[in-house]
Image: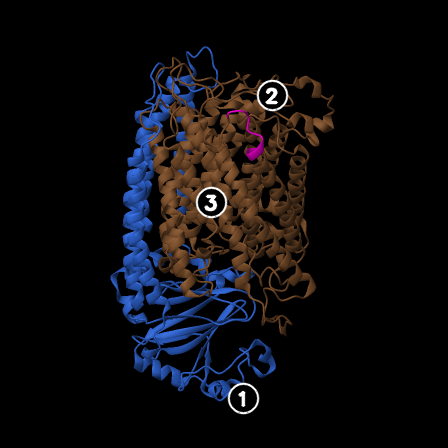
Chain colours: A brown, B blue
Amino acid sequence: MSATIDTHDHEDHEVHHHKETFVTKYIFSLDHKMIAKQYLVTGTLMGIIGILMSIMFRMQIAWPSEPNVLFEALLGKWAPDGVMSADVYLALVTIHGTIMVFFVLTAGLSGTFSNLLIPLQIGARDMASGFLNMVSYWLFFISCIIMVSSLFVEAGPAAAGWTIYPPLSALPMASGGSGMGMTLWLISMAIFIASSLIGSLNYIVTVINLRTKGMSMTRLPLTIWAFFVTAIIGVVSFPVLLSAALLLIMDRSFGTSFFLSDIFIQGEVLHYQGGSPVLFEHLFWFLGHPEVYIVILPAMGLVSEIMASNSRKPIFGYRAMIASILAIAFLSTIVWGHHMFVSGMNPFLGSVFTFTTLLIAIPSAVKAFNWITTIWKGNLQMNPAMLFSIGFVSTFITGGLTGIILGDSALDINVHDTYFVIAHFHLVMGISALYGMFAGIYHWYPKMFGRMMNKNLGYLHFWITAICAYGVFFPMHFIGMAGLPRRYYTNSSFPLFDDLANTNVIITVFAIIGGIAQIIYLYNFFVSIYYGKKAEQNPWKSTTLEWTTPVEHIHGNWPGALPQVYRWSYDYSKPGHDVDFVPQNVPLKEGEEELQH
Amino acid sequence: MTALLTIIIVLFVAVALWQMVKIFDLAQVGTATNTQVADDQDNKINGYLMMGFLAFIYIMTILCFWYIGDLPLLSNAASEHGSEVDNLMIISLVVIFIVQTITQFLLHYFAFKYKGEKGKKAFFYADNNTLEFIWTIIPVIVLAGLIIYGLFTWNDIMNIDEDEDPMVIELYAQQFNWKARYSGQDNVLGKANVRLIDIDRANILGVDEDDPNAQDDIIVSELHLPVGKPVVFKMRSQDVLHSAYMPHFRAQMNCVPGMVTQFGFTPTVTTEEMRQTPEIVEKVQGINELRRERAAEIQESGQELIYEFDYLLLCNKICGTSHYNMQMKIIVETQEEYDAWIKEQSTFPNSLN
């Protein structure tokens, strides 16, 4: 492999073409394109589990404690006679959160597109280390297996919320899921973090070292900027979660008291003394908050690229976009305390975190306005990827705006941990990142599989998903402002909330339809692999380097020499050219000036 | 009602689906070379759908405000700082509403207006520092205002003014119920630690029996507060994290094992007065209508059929199986009523076995 990575010389690539077996090609592959597909398929499978879970607990909220065939079929002994128990409900919301945040929107999104696009868009033969890349995927795979296997543990999987605050997560007597289920959760996450770190380091090194001739940092597509900065955030913050997980394992299994103190439970006093659950919250959110940017930044990068290409216009404010990515990345590491305004930490810290948190709105606003200006006076090609990108901007704005309320400590007091929070983060990072991922899949599917996805199914998928996403999460703002707490198995213990029951039914109906609509996508995705229309080399007429590679995947990406780059990646509809796009590897015409960007 | 709504929605979506498929079928006609790349027809249809979607967002916003936005919890706070929080909330919502309406319009309208046509060329427009400056500085100004207002409010809420001599009450959380401990005449809580819990003697809060301050403490499971008197809650938990959430008072604080957290406020409206306010009367009426519809089910569950408004303390931090039902009633009453009530409660030493 190493020989292929010594890139810039003009050696003939064919020399390195080893004979491949099924195992080296499809399973223990070192090729970044195959690893990207592995991430995507694994992430998709995890996503199916996560979404199914959400539909099940939404059904429970809408029709509390009513027998349900779906529960009986899927939950088995945990839903005797088809009635879900409170413990199972909590387990479902916990694992749903864990799977969607980490396994789908971190590994599934970042893993897929960083792997696919970094070498292709910077003009490299492969990742800096193909071997580490493979290790990263297989660690991720193992952590998936462990997480899924925790669903089958006798006392049930982790059920302390995806934030696994101790003492609830530390004491098996406090919650059934805090026994073996939580142990597996922690092990799975520790392996996941290792995978993520190895992957991130690889991305960083690749972007810094392996850019092809002429590909300066200011000529990089915004996708690469986003992946690069995301990887840096990951390297900075994931180890902190690893330490929190290890300390929690110590508390659980070896009797230390990092997070526990003065506990009386089930008739006995435990020996723990001197620890503080608030410490865990700090450690958790030091990752947990950057994590939402780890999820959303790659989506932002994908959307920027897709919007420019489909608008046939340069992305507006390229430099401002990079600056705002950097600003968001920096701020993301100093805002974690806004999750803890009512945790009992010093109110002065609350003031500081309110200040830093609301600052994030500024780069976010810049990005939103730049996207809107990008489509202004464009020649919009409404491919499914473009629809999802526009949808992304829409949900990002809707969800992001309510951050002004949640980031404001005085207001957070009253909506903290209510459905208002659920509405906010699902729109701004859940749905938005998912849209970014869908946009990326529709757009780069021809690159991944050499075939096109069916556009009409894509349109159907988008419009149903778009309506259902708003239908599910928009009303949640209002039931949250009415004071309805999250993670309640049923709201029927509080007559106060009876008038919200109908709204909850409507939300659930939207969720079910939205969930079913994803079958359209899955059908389209898997069937197109075999029966899709054969793709052209550059179906969307984009400028970036990945579209200069052959449709059939080859090791090393380009058959001959690596392409040389002469311009930035957004020369769409540039005056003085006959076509409305000029690929990056086309030299400047005589007298043509490269845009000062 | 619910079933009807569900059916209507399912029907509506089914019709929408059928219509869409129809549109796409029509769009296919005549395109001999199907490349799966959007053509002018696709751009046009989706452009119009974008406008439709904009209408959908607006209508949804209006419907939500109309049907579930009458938020008694937003308009009649029952604590002194509550009205300040509500003002800030309303200002923030107005800002959000304006920005949301404008940006969503621009986004979807542009998607409609500039839908692609063959042969058209987009406007090459890559940069404009003035524009970037404008949409950096506007959020800066708006946010500066919100931050300053927010921080003043926050400091106001969190700084407990000892000069006002607030009444000290302990809120004690355990899986899955609440207890309150009044500090009595001396207004000082007796020392307590979970290691002193003695179930056999009914010392369930682990209060130090030898502490003189503990002798007049009163432990109850229903919270009574005199109206207009500042209180400060000292919060403890014996097992896992809980959160004392009192939405009507705009108050919330986590209860953390191993430490004491606090939150203070002054209740301003008695339970009786609150029940008379038009918003609550209307809300309660609506709830009771819904409850009568499913009377059998409610009576089976052991709840009283007719709902009467009460302030509540809810647990708002996931704490295990019965998290969804960890509540305590709060009664705000006149000083006289409160005095009469507290006199009837037995003090801590008398409550022991």
Report the chain holding disc 2: A
Give coordinates of residue B25: x percent, y percent.
Answer: 43, 19
Give coordinates of residue B181: x percent, y percent.
Answer: 45, 78
Q: Real-space Cα distance between discs 2 and 1?
A: 80 Å
Under circle 2, the secondary element is helix
Query: Between A14 and B223, which is closer to the camera in this rendering?
Result: A14
Q: Which amino acid does label 2 sit on?
A: Tyr
Give coordinates of residue B124: x percent, y percent.
Answer: 34, 23
The residue carrying mark 2 is: A530
- Vertically, is B190 above or below B258? below
Report the chain holding disc 3: A
Q: Which of marks 3 and 2 is in front?
A: 3
Q: What residue type is labelled 1?
A: Asp
Residue at the location (45% across, 39% down)?
A432
Q: Real-space Cα distance between discs 1 and 3?
A: 55 Å
Under circle 1, the secondary element is loop
Image check: B130 left or right of A76? left
Q: Is there a contact, CB below 8 Å, between mark 2 and mark 1?
A: no
Q: Which amino acid does label 3 sit on?
A: Ala
The residue carrying mark 3 is: A329
| Quadrant occupied by the C terminus of chain A | top left
Residue at the location (64% across, 71% down)?
A270
The residue carrying mark 1 is: B210
In the rendered structure, which segment of residues is drawn in magenta?
Answer: A207-214
Query: Between B201 and B118, which is closer to the camera in this rendering?
Result: B118
Q: Real-space Cα distance between discs 3 and 2?
A: 40 Å
Q: Are marks 1 and 3 on the same chain?
A: no
Q: Which of marks 1 and 3 is in front?
A: 3
Q: Is residue A11 magenta?
A: no
Numbered label attached to residue B337: none
Question: Earlier along the polypeptide chain: callout 3 or callout 2?
Answer: 3
Q: Which of marks 2 and 1 is in front?
A: 1
